[in-house]
Amino acid sequence: MEKRLEIEQYIPFGEENAISRKRLAQITELNDRKLREAISRARRDTVILNLSNGQGYFRPIEGKEDDLVVRYFKQEESRLKRIGWSLLATRRRVKEIQNGKKNMV
């Protein structure tokens, strides 16, 4: 069984210490897809930020960088809404397809 990589151990505290995904890939020897998956899993239990400024990933310093946590949350919430809106026509078509199959049975 493969041991789970504790990716958060490689992600520093503080925005000024942010690490790029390219550097994380070099350190962990993970390809980009596996690295993104590891970060996604770690984010379930650990606050890991990457702001849209291109500096990279970091864990916020509690009390000092709380504003960045809020900013990141708003950034990602906005992204989630945009994705939802971009799927609107596809969502309608899927419902049509599914309803059509029900009517065929």
Image: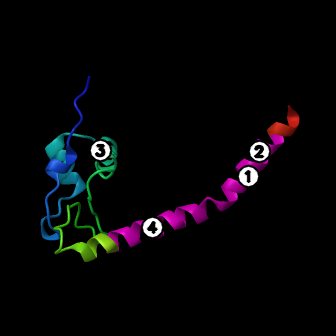
**Which quarter of the picture shows residue 65?**
bottom left
Q: Position of residue 89 (x, y in %)?
A: 69, 59
Q: Residue at x 57, y 62 (%)?
A: 84
Q: Nearer the viewer, residue 52 or 70?
A: 70
Q: Secondary structure at mark 4?
A: helix
Q: Position of residue 1 (x, y in %)?
A: 26, 22
Q: Is residue 77 inside the magenta stretch?
A: yes
Numbered disc 1: secondary structure: helix
| Crowd class of label 2 (few under 14; some 14 to 19; many from 20; radius 10 Å) | few
Q: Quadrant of the C terminus?
A: top right
Circle 4: residue type: Glu
Does 74 appear above or below 88?
A: below
Residue wearing tag 1: 93
Is 93 situated left or right of 46 in this image?
right
User: CB of mark 4 within 8 Å of CB of mark 1?
Assistant: no
In terms of secondary structure, where does tag 2 sit? helix
**Residue 10: in magenta span:** no
Q: Tell me which residue sits at (83%, 42%) in the image.
A: 100
Q: Which residue is mark 2?
A: 97
The answer to whether the residue labelled 2 contacts the one labelled 1, judged by CB atoms less than 8 Å apart, is yes
- The image quarter containing residue 11 is bottom left
Dot 3 crowding, Cα within 10 Å, few <14, some 14–19, many 20+: some
Give the residue pinned by disc 4.
77
Between circles 3 and 4, the one closer to the viewer is 4
* Above or below: residue 14 compared with residue 90: below
Label located before the other in sequence (3 or 4)? 3
Mark 2 is on which residue type? Ile
Camera-nearest label, 4 or 1: 4
Query: What residue is shown at x 18% (from left), y 68% (from top)?
Result: 62
In-image side of 99 versus 84 (left or right)? right
Magenta range is 71-100
